[in-house]
Image (tube, rainbow, N blue to C red):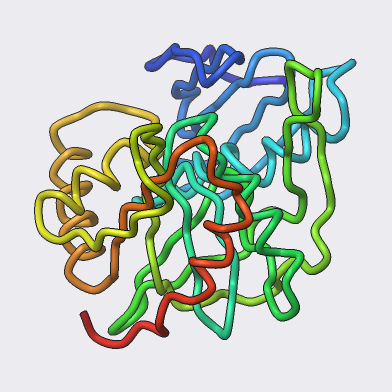
């Protein structure tokens, strides 16, 4: 990507296995995911240019373009995204939170086999507030799943990808406990709910102003949504959890 001004790099870190950095170039912001893509936008998050790195796989570029790159642009507009999978069911969204390896994509894929379930997001879930509720936006149309004997993930297309936002119904925090007997669903409130969501908030900087806005976001999310912790052992088939999530009641006022 050609730049008219040198880039003043502000943040340099790793996002999973990929080195990431962003900074300012004059009135613009530039972000780079090493070996995958580079983007330039204005400081209000309006995309100006996006270029794939030569040699990067088209599927990886598309995953990052629709996922973390879009989340980065949203962050410039002070909007929020979660490291989470999400599906739409009966007009409401079920969002699965948790660290890598807890089965977010697997659960989403199993849910998408059910009639009437649509994929909203595989790994990066965009949330926006409209008067009286939170909406989950459709962002990703592929699921990335681990395959037997493989160290990485491969893309899979769900039966139906959502085209319209869904009202946020449930936020589900996934955990494993091999001492657990079956599946336990525990609704969380207050500080416990905030603690369950906080590790999944995608952020691209760490400033006092960001922390203040983020606390407002979390407070609003917890006060207007339902949060449940789903605890299961590795022995429990993932299908059992998928079935249980579709039995959660439609959400009204908390």
Answer with the quarter of the image where residue 48 lies: top right
- The residue at the point 66 percent across, 13 percent down is 34
Q: Residue 224's image quarter? A: bottom left
Q: Is residue 120 left or right of residue 126?
A: right
Q: In what quadrant of the picture does the C terminus appear?
A: bottom left
- In the rendered view, would you say 170 is above or below 141? below
Spot occupied by residue 78 in the image (x, y as percentages of width and height)? 34, 51
Labels in figure, total = 0
Determine which quarter of the picture holds residue 10: top left
- Which residue is rendered at x = 29% and y = 47% of the image? 197
Using the rendered image of the protein, determine whether residue 79 is visible from the camera's viewpoint.
no
Residue at point 45% right, 38% down?
233
Instruction: Quarter of the image for the N terminus: give it.
Output: top right
Q: Position of residue 64 (x, y in %)?
A: 67, 35
User: Which of the pair 175/215 is nearer the observer?
Assistant: 175
The answer to whether residue 149 is above or below residue 173 is: above
Along the line of sight, which residue is nearer the eye, 66 or 244?
244
Residue plotted at (57% across, 66% down): 243
Q: Position of residue 9 (x, y in %)?
A: 44, 13
Q: Where residue 119 sits in the image (x, y, percent)?
A: 68, 63
Foreground residue among 12 and 118: 118
Q: 3 left or right of 167?
A: right
């Amino acid at each position: 990507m050609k730049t008219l001004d040198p880039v003043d790099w502000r943040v340099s870190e790793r996002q999973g296995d990929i080195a990431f950095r962003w900074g300012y170039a004059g009135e613009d912001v530039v972000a780079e995911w090493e070996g995958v893509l580079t983007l330039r936008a204005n400081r209000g998050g309006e995309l100006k240019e996006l270029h794939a790195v030569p040699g990067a796989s088209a599927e990886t570029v598309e995953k990052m373009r629709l996922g973390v790159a879009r989340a980065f642009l949203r962050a410039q507009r002070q909007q929020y995204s979660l490291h989470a999978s999400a599906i739409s069911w009966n007009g409401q969204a079920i969002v699965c939170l948790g660290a890598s390896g807890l089965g977010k994509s697997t659960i989403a894929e199993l849910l998408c086999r059910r009639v009437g379930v649509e994929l909203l997001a595989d790994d990066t879930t965009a949330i926006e507030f409209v008067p009286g509720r939170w909406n989950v936006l459709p962002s990703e149309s592929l699921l990335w799943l681990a395959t037997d004997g493989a160290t990485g993930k491969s893309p899979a297309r769900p039966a139906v990808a959502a085209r319209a936002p869904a009202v946020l119904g449930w936020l589900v925090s996934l955990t494993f406990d091999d001492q657990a007997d079956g599946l336990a669903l525990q609704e969380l409130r207050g500080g416990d709910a905030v603690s369950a969501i906080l590790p999944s908030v995608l952020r691209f900087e760490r400033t006092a102003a960001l922390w203040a806005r983020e606390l407002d976001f979390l407070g609003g999310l917890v006060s207007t949504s339902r949060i449940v912790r789903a605890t299961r052992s590795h022995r429990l088939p993932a299908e059992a959890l998928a079935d249980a999530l579709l039995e959660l009641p439609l959400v009204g006022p908390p």
